[in-house]
Image: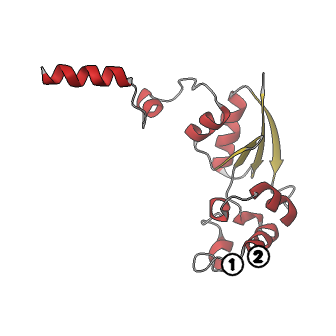
Amino acid sequence: MLKRVKLYTDPGDPLCSEAKTFLEEQEVLLQIHDIKQDPLSSMQISKLIRHFDLRHFLNEASHSYKKNKLDKLLPNREEVIELMAKDNELLRKPIIVAGRLMTVGCNRDKIIEMLQLKDNGDRPVEEQTRGKNTRTHKERRTTAREKKD
């Protein structure tokens, strides 16, 4: 069964292009929302962000972030959402939504985990296993015993 994914993207952003290419290589039905062509309204942003922490969705590298002094003090939620609606550059992209699950940014490991994809092996082995202990608990225990003897 194909997975359905909604991708909120800016085609001019290299991370968005990377995420789009990666998702196209996977077996997913991709629905693309081009934020440049069709900016999100405050209601759409509020619905998208739901109850999550706003800081996950703020693009700290955008000109508007510092212009609005969001690096100094974050206004209340409604004000930040209004600022995001006025300037979608404040939204960190890409935003990838699959049902109730969501990830922001282009972290392949998080996307693979969220969509329960199999890694196709394009990345080097060290990158595929980074942060994962590839030995089972039983194997680690056996090795520890062997070292004692």
How far across and how far down the image is residue 70, in percent?
63, 76
The residue where tag 2 is placed is: 79
Relative vertical location of residue 145 with respect to residue 71 in this rendering, above or below: above
How far across and how far down the image is residue 9, in percent?
75, 50
Amino acid carrying label 1: it is Pro
Question: What kind of element bears circle 1?
Answer: loop
Amino acid carrying label 2: it is Glu
Residue 1 lies in what quarter of the image? top right
Q: Are marks 2 and 1 in contact (CB under 8 Å)?
A: yes
Relative vertical location of residue 61 with respect to residue 1 in this rendering, above or below: below
Of 136 and 88, nearer the camera is 136
Q: How many residues crowd around disc 1 within 10 Å: few (fewer than 14), some, or many (20 or more)?
A: few
Residue 42 lies in what quarter of the image? bottom right
Residue sitting at x 43%, y 33% = 132
How far across and how far down the image is residue 41, in percent?
86, 63
In the image, is 9 to the left or to the right of 18?
right
Question: What kind of element bears circle 2?
Answer: helix
**Quadrant placement of the C terminus:** top left
**Residue furthest left as drawn:** 149
Residue sitting at x 71%, y 76% = 76
The residue where tag 1 is placed is: 75
Does residue 21 appear in this view? yes
Residue 39, disc: none
How far across and how far down the image is residue 48, in percent?
79, 55
Q: What's the distance in space between the residues labelled 2 and 1, CA to CA?
A: 6 Å
Of 142 and 62, nearer the camera is 142
Residue sitting at x 57%, y 26% = 119
Relative vertical location of residue 70 with respect to residue 2 in this rendering, above or below: below
